[in-house]
Amino acid sequence: MYTRTIKEVDALQREINKFRPLSRNALKQLKEYYRIGLTYSSNALEGNSLTETETKIVLEEGMTIGGKPLKDHLEAMGHSEAYDQLYKLSKNKVIAEEDILEMHKLFYYRIDKKNAGVYRKVPVIITGADIKFPPPSKIKPLMHEFTRKIPLLRKKYHPVEHSALIHLGLVNIHPFIDGNGRTARLLMNLALLQEGYVITIIPPILRREYLDSLKASNRGNNKPFINLITATVHESQKDYLRILQTLNEK
């Protein structure tokens, strides 16, 4: 899976572009399909116990799942709301600091209203991992600098590499008390959508590889993470093409 290249991604992107422009019905179905898939996978990477089917029931039917924590339900609902904001922001070609704060707020306000969309004021550590994050006093200037550089990254790198680097930039600052990974994955997908690429899902089965590549980035090596994201974009493109072909059957 890690042998996928940008060249292969570009080849699939050309196949996807042949189907465009998509009908309103196709766009609606695709958006709802990825709402479930991205919400489930992104939450599962962080230990949420809801299955994909249970996530669908919570979001589409408003039902609770017996025996599952309330927090897991709130995370699904919050992520779904942030996902809608992601689509609104995808119509722009810029990513502002307030956009990042708003996505975190939408995801997190049901869980912790006080800290939703607010930079952390305490140090954070990840148990069992030798990863260092900036102290609270440095977060605001680091986030200002991070968002200032986003347009420069967009010009310098391929959209897939650009989206991966944005994800890494946010995670390595770790600006929030919780929800940093989910906000980073939303941000990554925002960057992809803005450039015409598909919603990209990092499946929970790759959690170990995902975490290991994040650790490598924290120590200065971004290559494993960029390779991982290139591969997951490629897999998501194949899934997207399969759906497009189904939607275009006569």
Image: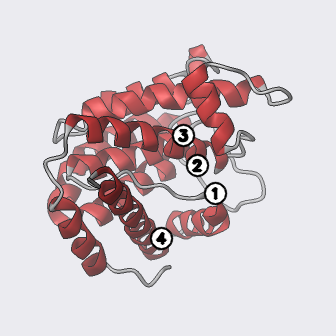
Residue 98, percent from left and from top: 32, 27
Q: What residue sits right under mark 4 in the picture?
A: 228
3 and 2 marks in contact (CB < 8 Å): yes
Instruction: Name the residue nearer the viewer: 31 or 137.
Output: 31
Classed neighbour count for the residue bearing mark 1: other residues with Cα under 10 Å, few (<14), some (14–19), many (≥20): some
Nearest to N terminus: mark 4 or mark 2: 2
The circle drawn on residue 39 is 3
Residue lying at 49% horizontally and 30% vertically, measured from the top left? 80
Vertical arrangement, residue 85 with respect to residue 219, above or below: above
Query: Mark 4 against mark 2, which lies toward the viewer?
Result: 2
Q: Is residue 153 left or right of residue 98?
A: left
Q: Quadrant of residue 59?
A: top right
Q: Can residue 97 be seen at all in this image of the molecule?
A: no
- Local secondary structure at mark 4: helix
Instruction: Name the residue nearer the viewer: 6 or 59.
Output: 59
Vertical arrangement, residue 241 with respect to residue 22, above or below: below
Q: What residue sits right under mark 2 in the picture?
A: 41
Q: What residue sits right under mark 1 in the picture?
A: 204
Q: Residue furthest front?
A: 250
